Amino acid sequence: MSIDKRPDGKYRARIREYPGGPERSKQFARKLDAERWVAEMRVAIARGSYLTADEMKITFGQYAQTYLSRQIWVDTTRRVACNSLQRAEDHFGPARPLSSIRRGDVQAYVVSLTSQFAPGTVRTNFQHVRTMMRAAHIDGVITVDPTMGITLPKVTSELVILSPDQTCGLLDAADPAFRAAIVLGAHVGLRAGEVQGLFVSDIDFLRRTINVRRQLDGRTSAMTLKAPKSKAGTRSVPVPSVVLDVLAAHVQQFGAGRDGVLMHTDGEYLSNNQLNYQWRRAQVGAGHVKGSLRFHWLRHAFASSLISAGVSVKAVADAMGHENPAVTLRTYASLWPGDDDRIRTALEGVWNIADLLRTKSAQTGS
């Protein structure tokens, strides 16, 4: 590190991060400023927070591409991450150096998202930006993680349970070719993708079970089959005869589609757009506002039915395909009956105080 006075009277300060490394220089009008800059650079190098000139030029988009190329993700996760990071790049600007982004910039970005999306979507977008920024910090591309201490909108997750009357109303209003999908959601607890990926061969009419083995990713025209959401998602769900009767009638009337898929449109897999279209038609036909109900709420109705019937947490978790019962409890804890009445019933069964008091009263009066 050195400071030289140039012929024009200015001072040029030069530093190297390590002996033999690339040189970085900067000119100052005053020698004092040059000395201060050199001292600051020495501290930065010692702390490991020094950025080279090339590192300071790396833009948000450039590092995002590097970050994405390192990730081992399924296609759905990669697509969501790409969309989230592209949205952030559009906000910050394509030429914005990553190292110039401050905490206030990130907070302003979150505020802009809040005006466009629901709190859960805002958190998902921010999560991908935060993970990328942490990776950049570890890589030494930025000296400070600007996503630390960001205030996010609160997510209020209200559990909506469709009543049996509402479910029946949707069934009556649905296109006959779509009714089996509603039955699979409300009475078997299948996710939308699991409904789309169910084959006729997955229905075991003899054992009265439905075997969930795959789901369909129908977000794009290139629809692909993949494993369920988690290992627990691969499951066998016991079903009543009435459900099997509905499915058998569906197969008899509409047949199986390509590869033996149950739900189809002209023999082809049922895409997300087609499923949503049929679901909205059923809503409107049943007297609901279009888009006011989610297909996933049928799954909540299924869980509610099991819990009301006294099915154990473990059994509900298995039927739902949850990774562990803790997920089931966290989602549906409010549906399980309170313990107060159970305590009263249990104690009354063990200690019948009323009979005891009546006996004592009779003995005293005699």
Image (cartoon, rainbow, N blue to C red):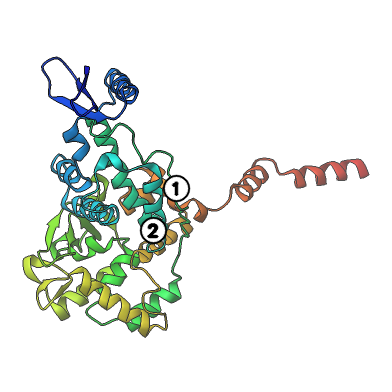
Q: Is mark 2 on a helix, strand or loop?
A: helix
Residue 362: x percent and y percent?
Answer: 87, 45
Q: In this view, does 53 lie to the left or right of 267?
A: right
Residue 327: x percent and y percent?
Answer: 39, 46
**Looking at the image, residue 218 lies above or below residue 172:** above
How many numbered discs, if any?
2
Residue 312 visible to an observer of this rendering: no
Q: Is mark 1 on a helix, strand or loop?
A: helix
Q: In this view, does 154 lie to the left or right of 295?
A: right
**Looking at the image, residue 69 lies above or below residue 296:** above
Q: In this view, does 257 lie to the left or right of 292?
A: left
Which labelled disc corresponds to residue 90?
none
Q: Is residue 91 left or right of residue 215?
A: right
Question: In which quadrant of the rendered view does residue 24 lie?
Answer: top left
User: From this viewpoint, which residue is outermost toward the right?
Assistant: 365
* Point 24% across, 77% down: residue: 178
Q: What residue type is labelled 1?
A: Arg
Depth check: give the residue in front, 229 or 207.
Answer: 229
* Point 20% across, 22% down: residue: 14
User: From this viewpoint, which residue is outermost toward the top?
Assistant: 19
* Point 87% across, 44% down: residue: 361
